[in-house]
Image (cartoon, coloured by chain):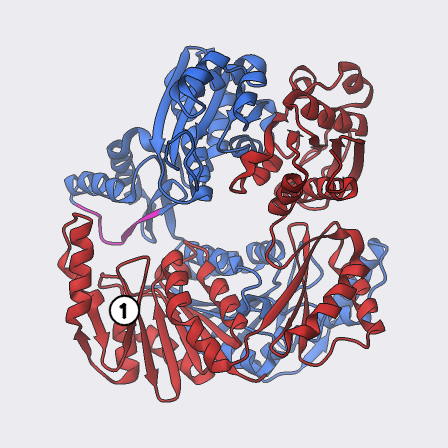
Chain colours: A red, B blue
Amino acid sequence: VTGLTGAVLCIGDELLLGDIVNTNGSWLGSALAAVGVHVVHGATVGDDRERLVTAVRRAMADADVVVLTGGLGPTIDDLTRDALAAVAGVGLTRWPDLEEQLRARYASLDRRMPEAVLRQADVPDGAQPLVNPQGTAPGLRIEVGDRVLYALPGPPHEMTATAQLGVLPELAERTGSRVTTRTLRCAGIAESDGAEQVEAALDALGGVPAGVDLAYLAGSGILRVRFSTDGDPAVLEPLVEAARAALGDVVWGRDEQLQPAVVGGLLQAAGQTVATAESLTGGLVAAALTAVPGSSAYVRGGFVAYATDAKSTVAGVPAEVLAAHGAVSEPTARALAEGARARFGADWGIATTGVAGPDLQDDQPAGTVHLAVAGPDGTRHERWHFPGERDRVRVVTVVQALDLLRRALQDAGPGSS
Amino acid sequence: VTGLTGAVLCIGDELLLGDIVNTNGSWLGSALAAVGVHVVHGATVGDDRERLVTAVRRAMADADVVVLTGGLGPTIDDLTRDALAAVAGVGLTRWPDLEEQLRARYASLDRRMPEAVLRQADVPDGAQPLVNPQGTAPGLRIEVGDRVLYALPGPPHEMTATAQLGVLPELAERTGSRVTTRTLRCAGIAESDGAEQVEAALDALGGVPAGVDLAYLAGSGILRVRFSTDGDPAVLEPLVEAARAALGDVVWGRDEQLQPAVVGGLLQAAGQTVATAESLTGGLVAAALTAVPGSSAYVRGGFVAYATDAKSTVAGVPAEVLAAHGAVSEPTARALAEGARARFGADWGIATTGVAGPDLQDDQPAGTVHLAVAGPDGTRHERWHFPGERDRVRVVTVVQALDLLRRALQDAGPGSS
């Protein structure tokens, strides 16, 4: 590994006690990797001065760059400033202009400023404050020997804003090796099958070149195939294209794209609309589609047809279909999709019915799922069996239902309506 | 602090690189705290033998008990077994009965077993395997000096199952100090207001007794007020009761209860059913209600009435109400709740309409929300303004909508239908 090594140190009793999940750590790991810093050390430490000093020293022993988050607030539990001063062997000085900024901020909010807030204007000697565009506590940057330490506030939106302004640009410039990443996003394929197909295609090109990393990341029904390099980005495109050709129709997106936004983009490009009819997913398909800002341009609405008779009385499934085939069946899925399309006056209808579990339904095992998409040119159906518990079955069903709509939209083409 | 100290060490390049969020760390932090182990050290380390050995030694320097997760799989990147053997200064021996179990497991799945899988039968000398009820890789327990190390598999469902079976009971017995926790769960109150009310009530009782911890945990529209002690649990109940009385009607649950299950329990106790009509939440209220196993007993279904005209054509809002008051209004919210109740034949209807953002709608700012609940005794309405971005507005709206239904159900009483 060339370039800089990094350590990420997250501070707060609430992290050690598991009261909150440490999303700062994963954000920083990924952001540092993207600017060519190889993270080799991660640590969580509580609000304890001695343990914090030990943790900072260990991080400095392991890595060129140490990024800390948390412990910069105004209370006596906020010990990051003290720990940095101790590690650097310096004192703390209150900066008048930082003090002035804190007073001005409270005045502008028309709030009384507790005196303790001014601790946030204390800076270890030799350190520089980092602008925090989202909050009162500035970050800090300090060099100790040949190590550089950055302390960031703990609240995630303050941490990311401060890092983007005052940490990542400097590190990108130092490494000179901005990492380029290209990702293919897939649904409906197992990690092992995806890897086999991609690797056969890359072998035909002579294998993965030196300096390129290839990773498979699977979760919640989505497989990401990720190529990255800190060398010439142009080397990636032929690899990505070969992988895409090998994977075929399971690829629904690239890089940071999200599935509901991809489907929404196809709907908008076609000038078409969608409606949903959900049983086992209970509203999650509609919720995913409407999570996208601006989705009111193409989402008409949907049914949650949870009770069996509501599939007929509300969502338009003929009673004889339900009686003959049951709620969890291909004909019911098709009728739900067609009912949503007709009753909401949408171009497309998308339906889910199945057994989320844990119990059997109509003698069918948990994980049995029927999907249907009704469109201008007819209705298509898929039957799946998803392993796992209730929550996972529901989430993976949403992914696969949106993917069925994506493929139908792509097959219909941009000018199909 | 009495009792044992603990360290949690999470292993895997994907954690350092931020490819996945470390939920294992928070689960273990909270599980260890509950059996009286005070977690003082958390670390993340990549798939690198030397760094892993260093990280284990540091954890052992800091804590009596070290819990590791990850690195127990069959690949050459799985180095936990090797690292434990190195730290203990022992060799690895393949256990014939573990080998037999692995072969039998693959045979029962009718799958070919790659030879590398047998590495999972290698045990450091002096260690004991821990049963993994959810996967192929057993955990390991080894004593090194006066430290005890537990290695658990990385996949979360395997990690939790293995810990619950082979780690937590032993630690609970060793500490003898099971920590008792009592939590009040609230909606619709700010952390600072909740804290002020609780502390005034506790001051009247003479304050929080020594040995009792009081914490406020706020997030996603829910405030948790948590009392804990490793002493006599009986000391907690009067404190919880005083806090509950002071907080009043904002308390919707206790301890580990989840909001949709609480609402579902009230519906089941009353023998009643519910239907939804959602605009800005786009299906999230229905999805929350149906996340509970067995919810088909009381959830009839719902509408996602996203397009304004669908509120009328599908969900039963009179066109003149929409024309006179707009989609984001009290009359529309009331009509949506009543429409859901009537069209699904449910005892209760619950409705959301508002502006999720980021843009204004009908000149109303993002965060404007109208909720309504229609029931056997009429319809109630609330207007809220929630700060934050689109996702947060939607999530907090779900919490507050379910809470409006909860209060209506409690006011109606158990024998109201």
Residue A374 pos. (x, y %): 75, 30
Which residue corresponds to the image point at 50% horizontal and 29% vertical from the top-left? B279
Residue A42 pos. (x, y %): 47, 71
Q: Quadrant of the N terminus of chain A?
A: bottom right
Q: In which quarter of the image is the C terminus of chain A?
A: top right
Which residue corresponds to the image point at 65% horizontal and 65% vertical from the top-left? A182
Which residue corresponds to the image point at 19% horizontal and 38% vertical from the top-left? B201
* Residue stretch rendered in magenta on the structure: B207-217
* Quadrant of the rendered image containing residue A369: top right
* Quadrant of the rendered image containing residue B380: top left
Q: In this view, does B265 lie above or below A46?
A: above
Query: Residue A11 vs residue B286: left or right?
Result: left
In front of the other: B73 or A5: A5
In front of the other: B173 or A271: A271
Q: In the rendered image, which residue does mark 1 sit on? A: A79
Q: Is residue A359 above or below residue A223?
A: above
How dense is the environment of label 1, judged by Cα within 10 Å: few (below 14), some, or many (20 and up)? Answer: many
| Chain name for mark 1 | A
Q: In this view, does A170 lie above or below A70?
A: below
Confirm whether residue B173 shows in the render. Answer: no
* Quadrant of the rendered image containing residue A362: top right
Residue A282 pos. (x, y %): 61, 32
